[in-house]
Amino acid sequence: MRAETEAVRIDGRVQQERANEMSRLPEIDPATATGKAAVQLEETQKAMGSVPNLLKVLVNSPAAVKGYLAMNGALASGVLSFPVRERISILTAELNNCTYCLSAHTFSGGRFAKLSDAELAAAREGKSEDPHVQAILTLTRSVIEGRGQGGEEVVGAARAAGVTDAEIAEVVANVSLNVLTNYFNELVDTEVDFPKVSPHSH
């Protein structure tokens, strides 16, 4: 009887731990999705090659996923390279204390953008040994911490450091896209499906 009671306690604890890992909004399985959600999850699979938990939860609003994919796809063909955009994503997630996005972009930054461990760590601090990338990350930090304020001074400093007007526009656009996912993931507590990387204390 004691063993059975202990087994129940252990099983209950495991179930509670699993419950604590679940998102506050339901994950929609691509295999059983219907209607507009199914369409958007199929588009996600085509665009990204997989469906991360973020989009399984965000697709509770198919329109939100459609908007995310559209903006992400547009910025992928912009003037900022993929490695630079991954650094922006890492810094934004770090400053917004988003574990999910920091984990996801640390993974993709290393695996697909081919950033070294040192470059990934530096991005979290808004640093780069490349002067042009450093200027872009400095602008990124200014946009996030200033919430878009300080326009003349911030834009002037970026231009003086060699950041083009197109790059300035896309830094703001990339920050905005990442704020969407940062805020969403933190609000609904999306389960992390990448090697977990926790933000530093700020």
Image (cartoon, rainbow, N blue to C red):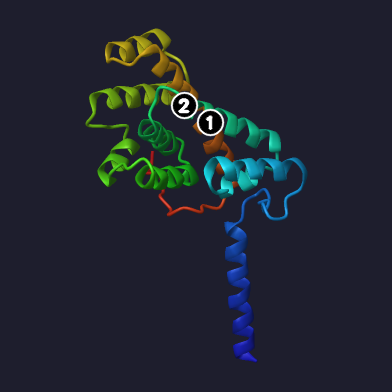
Say left or right for 12 vs 90.
right
Task: Name the spot of residue 179 as percent of width and height, x first.
Answer: 52, 32
> Which corner quadrant of the image does residue 42 belong to?
top right
Give the residue pinned by disc 1: 73
Q: Nearer the viewer, residue 90 or 51?
A: 51
Q: Residue at x 47, y 30 (%)?
A: 76
> Which corner quadrant of the image does residue 124 belong to?
top left
Quadrant into which the C terminus falls = top left
- Single out the residue that lies furthest toward the bottom: 1
The answer to whether 200 is drawn above or below residue 8 in the figure is: above
Estimate the spatial distance between the alpha carbons at disc 2 and disc 1, rounded to whole Å.
7 Å
Task: Name the spot of residue 201 as percent of width and height, x first.
Answer: 38, 43
Q: Residues within 10 Å of mark 1 (few under 14, many from 20)?
A: few
- Single out the residue that lies furthest toward the right: 35
Task: Name the spot of residue 163 as percent of width and height, x first.
Answer: 33, 16
Q: Residue at x 52, y 37 (%)?
A: 182
Q: Residues within 10 Å of mark 2 (few under 14, many from 20)?
A: few
Marks 2,1: beta carbons within 8 A: yes
Q: Amino acid at mark 1?
A: Gly
Q: Which mark is residue 185?
A: none
Give the residue pinned by disc 2: 77
Say left or right for 43 vs 117.
right
Q: Amino acid at mark 2?
A: Ser
Quadrant into which the N terminus falls = bottom right
Q: Residue at x 68, y 51 (%)?
A: 28
**Circle count:** 2
Q: Nearer the viewer, residue 32 or 200?
A: 32
Q: Secondary structure at mark 2?
A: loop
Task: Name the spot of residue 158 as percent of width and height, x first.
Answer: 33, 15
The answer to whether 146 is drawn above or below residue 98 in the figure is: above
- Single out the residue that lies furthest toward the front: 46
Q: Secondary structure at mark 1?
A: helix
